[in-house]
Image: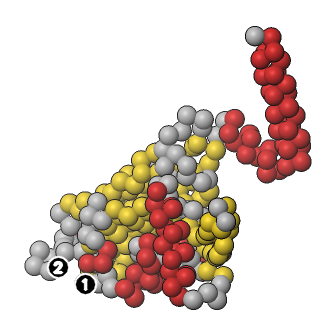
Amino acid sequence: MIARILGLMLAALLLGGAKPVLVPDVSQRDIEIVYSFTGAELLLFGAILYPDRSLPDPDADPAEIVVVVRGPVQSVMMRQKEKIAGIWVNAESMRYRSVPSFYAIASSKPIERIVDERTRAIYELGLDSLQLSPITSAPADLQTRFVQGLIDLRRRTGLFVEAPESVEITDGVLYRARITIPARVPVGRFTAETFLIRDGRVLAAAVREIDIRKSGFERFVARAAENQSVLYGLIAVALSVLFGWGAGALWRRF
């Protein structure tokens, strides 16, 4: 993740002398998750600065904008269940080393109309271009089935999102897009990457960071579980026994 950010920043600096430069921002740099958190909506906006403060050539093909919001990567184990003798059991399994905990891409046009397959793979633009790093030597068809299952599962929970034609560009200079952050989003440091693309080439790129963290009682519980796991487990068991005994006592009384 750090290498990706540094690479994009270096590319922007190298391109800044003779080509357009992106000046991006986000509506929220910090998102706090409390007990009543139901999700959030990020506004990603910015400007395209052209050399010598000029305006884009009206006769040239318009530039396109692609925005990618990405969460920390994580290791994921996928298992396929099969019904044997009337019982569902785990069958095939596959582990991936670098699955984004959250991935959303918004673009001014469908991504396949903006860049070719090779460029999509280099910059991981689109769900079908994610580099998930599977730890396996399984046949290609089995890997494809597992990847499709993983993507479909993340789609249904709102953690993987594709929003083509959702980036608005005004006068070829200003742009904005909205990304929905679901209530089940994991915590961590996220990145919002913005790409300026013309004629299938990435002309500029820029990155902004977003911190999503728990707050209040949720933060206390999360820190206790992480830093004092044994004590946290004992308290959780004791509370479960206490509440169970209390419920049983009330049931016997009434």
Say what amino acid the circle numbered 1 marks: Asp
Quadrant in the rendering for residue 248: top right
Q: Farthest left residue?
A: 59
Say which residue appears at 62% left-offset and 48% top-offset: 213
Going by the numbered disc 2, the residue's amino acid type is Asp
Instruction: Examine the image and state in which quarter residue 165 appears.
Output: bottom left
Q: Are marks 2 and 1 in contact (CB under 8 Å)?
A: yes
Instruction: Check disc 1 and report the residue beneath it.
Output: 199
- When the figure is inspected, residue 76 is found, relative to residue 237, above or below; the finding is below
Give the number of the disc on residue 28: none
Q: What percent of the width, then of the height, locates residue 127?
A: 44, 72
- Name which residue lies at 47% across and 65% down: 152
Residue appearing at x 38%, y 64% in the figure: 162
Q: Look at the image and tell me in which quarter the C terminus lies.
A: top right
Spatial separation of the CA atoms under disc 2 and disc 1: 7 Å
Q: Name the residue under label 2.
A: 61
Nearer the observer, 215 or 113: 113
Residue 204: x and y, percent?
A: 37, 77
Looking at the image, is mark 2 or mark 1 earlier in the sequence? 2
Considering the numbered disc 1 on the image, is that residue within a helix, a strand or a loop? loop
The picture places residue 117, in percent across and down from the top left corner, at 37, 85
